[in-house]
Every structure is written in C-alpha cells, then in structure tokens.
Amino acid sequence: MKKRGIFSLAAAVLFVWATSNVASASVLTPQYDTTPPTTDINTISGWDTTGMDMNGMQVSVNSGAPVTWSNGVAAGAGWALTMVDGFQGSPFATGSTEWWGLELTVTDPTLNIDNLVINALPGNAVFDVDPHIDFVGPNPSTGLDYSTPGSRDGKPIAPGYTDWNGDASVQMSAGLNVQATYSQVISFLGATYEDLYGTLTLNFYDNTGAPIAFTSNDSLYFVSDTDNLRTPSVPEPATLLLFGIGIAGLVGCRRKNN
C-alpha cells in the first residue's frame, strides 16, 4: 500500500472516531396520553395566545410545589421558565406562543431537574398540538375533524418545526435529548379531537436513551403552541337591576315626551 493510501485510511478512521464521539442532541417524538378523564370546554376565545394570556398557569420541576406563570415568566428556587425574544428582551409577555419560545434555565449548580411540568388550565389555556387549520379531516383515529372548532395552527414540541426566526423550534445543549408528553386531553362540547391538552411534561435523556437531569450547564429553548379559553361572563344581579332601571327610565321619558 502506498503512503498516500495509508494516510487516507488513517484520516478516515480518525474522522469516524471523532464523529462517533460528538455529543449530539435531538428532540424526540412526543407522546400523547389520551386516557380519561378528559376536561370539557365549551369555547375557544383565541388560537393566537400570548404569554400574558397564560397568566395563572402552574409550572413545577421534579413534581414539587408549582410556581405561577405571570407576564412571561415562572421563577422557582434556582430555576426559571421565561418567554424569550432576542429583539424585545425577556420576558417577552406579548409574544405569540405559536412562534415565540420558552427558555428553561437553572442558576443553582446543585439543582438537577428530572422533569418539567406545565399545567396550562389554571392559566385559562390549553396546548394545541395539531398543525392543521380548522376542519381538515376526518381524523382516522377519532372519526372527527382534525382540529377542535375554534382552534388552528398548533405546534407541538417535535422535530421539523420552526420558530419566528425560521430556526428550529426546539434547541438544546449537546448531549441532551428532550421528549414531551401531552396529557389531560381536552374535549369540546363532549367531543374529543385529541389535539388539545391541559398538561405538558418534559423529560430528558442521554444519547443511549437513559434518563438524565437538566442542570445549570444545560440550555433548552422550545416552542409549544397554546390556545386561550374563554369563560362567558355572567352579569351580577346588581348590574342587571341597574340595567333594568335604566330601561324603565328611558321608557318613562319617552311616554312623558309623547
């Protein structure tokens, strides 16, 4: 074998060894838990939800006490989940959850996060995982239209999606693999479309598939679309009484003028 061939073979072996030892990172295919019980809703007030629209949702790590999301951020002891934007600054409470992402950070070097749980329902919101626009169907698994009426353009934590800047909608540090599980499936007027969920759980794995912890050395940015729910307002009895008095006064004035 010529020396040139020996050098080429050595270079090829070195390249294979180097690439096999690079710490990769990926977002894994999400899981969807559709088992009962379901939470039934009667309307969706907005499919384009901002960070402020989710005020009140509960965020917890390691199954601990939840922290309340407020105006684009939920901050716990040594950790924070923040809605971010490179142009407007953070927290970016007015950004749409369809395009703007959330960033998980750990400031306590002794803290190991095994899981992150976001319960959106206390914030009058739900996670929308179906990218279809309204009434594209039927869905073979449900026999119904793909999207819940009033919901559209969902985005799960999954491969193949982009954010507002056209970058990957999920970005993480090397060696960290992320998997989302959506649970607490939502029904609409008694019908379940399997596109809306109340709870999102994130778990972390290494490249062998073994569970690992998220630490202060790691970084995670992800986009997971939410829809806003509306609770119809019911006028208070005093308000109705004043409204009735006002109508009676108008009728009396009209009779007097006549």
Image (cartoon, helix red, strand yellow):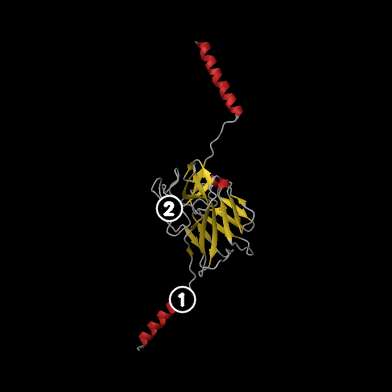
SS under mark 1: helix
Q: On residue 210, which mark appears? A: none
Dot 2 amino acid type: Ser
Earlier-in-chain disc, 2 versus 1 = 1
Q: Report the side of 175 relative to 6 (left or right).
A: right
Question: Circle 2: is it few (<14), some (14-19), or many (20+) Cα within 10 Å?
Answer: few
Q: Residue at left 59%, top 62%?
A: 114
Seen from the viewer's position, the closer of residues 159 and 21 is 159
Q: Is residue 61 above or below residue 13?
A: above
Seen from the viewer's position, the closer of residues 246 and 9 is 246
Seen from the viewer's position, the closer of residues 154 and 41 is 41
**Where residue 119 appears, x then y in whole percent?**
57, 51
Q: Report the side of 187 relative to 60 (left or right).
A: left
Q: Residue at left 47%, top 60%?
A: 29
Q: Is residue 61 above or below residue 245?
A: below
Between disc 2 and disc 1, the foreground one is 2
Question: Circle 1: is it few (<14), some (14-19), or many (20+) Cα within 10 Å?
Answer: few
**Where residue 25 appears, x then y in whole percent?**
49, 66
SS under mark 2: loop
Residue identified by numbered label 2: 141
**Where residue 98 appears, x then y in whole percent?**
46, 50
Q: Is residue 97 visible?
A: no
Q: Residue at left 49%, top 43%?
A: 190
Q: Is residue 79 visible?
A: yes
Q: Is residue 225 above or below residue 206?
A: above
Farthest bottom residue?
1
**Where residue 198 appears, x then y in whole percent?**
53, 50
Q: Residue at left 52%, top 44%?
A: 40
Residue identified by numbered label 1: 18
Dot 1 amino acid type: Ala
